[in-house]
Image: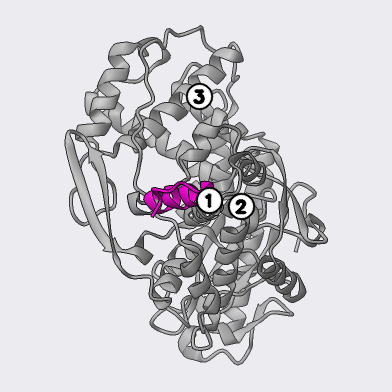
Amino acid sequence: MRSYPDLNFVYRLINCSSVIFKLNLVYMLAIKPVYKIQNLRKDGTVKLYLQYCHSSDIHPLLETGIGIPPKYWNRKKLLINADLPEIYGSAETLNEELRMQTRKAEDFVTLLLKKKVTDPVEMIKLHYSSGITLSELEALLDKTADDVFKNDVTKNQDIYFQIDHYINGKLKKVSKDMGRIYRNMKDHLKEFEMFRKEPVTFDCLDINFYEAFVDFLTYDYVHKARKKKIVGLKVNTVGRTIKQFLGFIKDRVKKRIIKPIDMAGWKILEEEVDAIYLTTQEILKIYKLDLSEYPQLAVHRNDFLLGCLTGMRFSDFSKLSPEDMRGHMLHKKQQKSEHWVVIPLMKEAKKILDQRFESNAENSCYNTFNNQIKTIGKLAGINYPVKHSYKKGNKMISEIRPKYAWITTHTCRRSFCTNEFLAGTPVELIMKISGHKSVKDFYKYIRISPEEAAVKIRDIWRERGSYLAG
């Protein structure tokens, strides 16, 4: 197999209990994980992919169209075992197909790097499985040499080209989840362009455009990939799109790629959202939960507890290394804010980290983690109904779900901040650990009910010796 200094093709394999092995092939993560065999398809096979390691954070998967039962994959030799039943195909033929596909992928990436394509990852994802040949891809690149992929950034005034360039520059500095937020902003803009049947350009950006864009997102945007037609976005989703679009415009102006644009009157819409936190008693339930029947959930349970006990974001607590721990303290540079924090470790948190480092456990996948922690909350009995309300257009929408169904990765951070606040820890000290830079942002994470607030005030009165405290 040929190798190139600019790329590194590897395979990675994920076993049926979600433990990730550093190999050369991967199984596709199930859309709806089950408890024990979450990666198998109904016929007992898993899909095999090629994974292009473009960088430490970007690993696009390339379809091979090959599927086999996991036990016939040789992890040491990185081949399909010769004893593969004929019903799944010839092992010799399938191995040769994998080798051919690997060479094809290598040739594609080498060509993209040679042609200095702006976004080789997007290009190989777009064309690898399309059936296009290497010569056809080269002809396509030559044909578009003066277009998006090789254009001078300072001269190309196509707004979507500039958005792509902006996103590519940002992805190196932000968490993976931000990439999704940037792409959503671009998709919303494209949908608006189709809706109004006029191209979006830098010249059309004024207060009238802003108001029309907000109205479209609020009342006319149709959600994709939904069985039931859903129209309109939540207030905070609209606000997030406008915020990212404004950030993009300011960046292009700052770099003198476009002329200054009057953005006066462009407001970032925002409403206070309902969000849960877990009490110390509920966290203790999860800590004591017997998962002997669901061993694949133990890693996610430990990661969730670690987030609740340290206040770290998923992007930080899922990527810890032994070097981050110094005695009973964690020294961590936050990925989102690039801000250094020093976090004291409770004995339970230190125990979880010691076990993780000793077992050399792999990092959790964001989507899998988000699904599994709901299952863990359900098993722990955190199921009393919780009502959340939000504004959508000119309507107030209310939803009632069991509390475990509202648990997300952000619940960890909210739980830490809220529980420390209720325990009387000074806000400025909590912020030093959580990394919040402003008191306003910090208080967005505090989630207490009116009853909890009343009890807290009563306790304060009692500590002061107030005779009316009861």
Counting from the top left corner in percent of width and height, residue 292 is at 53, 88
Looking at the image, what colour scheme do you see? one colour
* Residue type indicated by callout 2: Met
Label 2 crowd (10 A; few <14 / some 14-19 / many >=20)? many
Counting from the top left corner in percent of width and height, residue 343 is at 71, 52
Q: Tell me the number on the disc at residue 312.
A: 2
**Secondary element at image label 1:** helix
- Name the residue tied to disc 1: 463
Asked whether, in this view, residue 394 is left or right of residue 134, the answer is left
* Mark before the other along the chain sequence, 2 or 3: 3
The alpha-carbon separation of the residues under discs 2 and 1 comes to 31 Å
Q: Nearer the viewer, residue 392 or 97?
A: 392
Q: Residue at x 61, y 72 (%)?
A: 13
The magenta segment: 453-470
Q: Residue at x 56, y 20 (%)?
A: 251
Q: Nearer the viewer, residue 124 or 299?
A: 299
Q: Nearer the viewer, mark 2 or mark 3?
A: 2
Counting from the top left corner in percent of width and height, residue 144 is at 52, 29
